[in-house]
Image: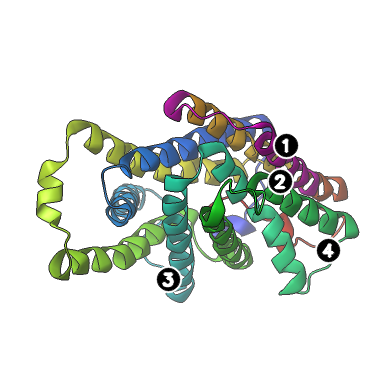
Amino acid sequence: MSTGAALAAPRPERAGLGVLFIALMAVCFVTLDSSVKLLGAGLPVLFILAFRYAFQAAAMALWLAVSRRRPGGAGFRSAHPRFQIARGTLLLTTSALSFWAVQVLPMAEFTALILLTPLLVTLLAGWVLREPVSLLRWAAVAGGFAGALIMVRPGGGVFGWGALLPLAAALSYAVFQVLTSKLSTLESPFTTHCWTGLVGTALALPPLLAWAAFGELDLWALLRGLDGAQWALLLLAGATGTVGHLFLILALGLAPASKLMPFMYLQIGVAGLSGWLVFNHRPDAWALAGMAVVAACGALGAWLNLRGGPAARPRSVVEADTSAD
């Protein structure tokens, strides 16, 4: 939200439409992850990552080029480029870890581990920002990590080191959210979304081109060898990654994050369905139990936000957008 929008009269809350946008966001993000998992069987993850961010940069640049002609439309210029670069770097790091993680983990379990992010934001808010965190919130954090341990089952040989990738991605995303929550009123979300794509592309392309120039990757042969299904999946990954974030932006403009956050855990169910239909994977009883614990603890944290009411205390980073851009 831009500063001007923040000072304008608040729009009426439309929680039902916000929940619909959250459900659409979940479908988009699971489609993105499924596309990346399918593409990873035949394409380098670094290539997929660079394409995903290049698509977002191009799509949002076109969006801004059209919208800036209308009164009040967002533009390309950022008043806080350092913030945008830091934010884009953190989100690219999150995406890179996630894209590699989804190659080695089942969809539902991967998604549940990524959705530890809201609990990690609570942890960072209390530890780094010294914000007050109640005992119930700490209990939700502890419960969420217990759910993750149930899924990973250290020593059980279920996931191994691959489980550390989504946990690292969730931590990177939590730092990203703390930064975003503190500075989110400084820029238009559409300008920020464009910068995110530009920064991601600027950081992902050089190592890809260096690999092609000095390594064993023949980039032109790779591009010429892409078949129709791979092009379709690449475009689908770029589109769903971009549109999914826009759905979240729209949802957060219609209702508070504290009301929407419980529904963000629908993504675990959608991921489980995708894992079954596309990859023929069904989580076992332990994995289902761990996912249920993570979702319940995340929903508890959201309920604690809602119970306090927006007027009961100053807005905290814990109550801010803790799921995506």
The local crowd at label 3, few if under 14, some if 14 to 19, many if 20 or more residues have their Cα within 10 Å, is: some
Estimate the x, y position of residue 306 in percent, counting from the top left: 81, 45
- Secondary structure of the residue carrying numbered label 1: helix
Q: Quadrant of residue 53?
A: bottom left
Dot 4 crowding, Cα within 10 Å, few <14, some 14–19, many 20+: some
Q: Which residue is mark 2?
A: 150
| In the image, residue 282 above or below residue 54 | above
Spatial distance from mark 2 to mark 4, Cα to Cα? 25 Å
First in sequence: mark 2 vs mark 4: 4
- Mark 4 = which residue? 133
| Residue at the spot 36% in from the left edge and 57% down from the top edge | 197
Which residue matches tag 3? 85
Q: Nearer the viewer, mark 3 or mark 1?
A: 1
Depth check, mark 1 against mark 4: the one in front is: 1
**Tag 4 and tag 3, C-beta contact below 8 Å:** no
Q: Magenta segment range?
A: 277-301
Which mark is first along the chain, 3 or 4? 3
Mark linked to residue 289: 1
- N-terminal of the two: label 2 or label 3? 3
Q: Position of residue 223 (x, y in %)?
A: 14, 47
Amino acid of disc 2: Ile
- Hey, what amino acid is under mark 1? Ala
Q: Residue at x 30, y 50 (%)?
A: 48
Q: Is residue 231 magenta?
A: no
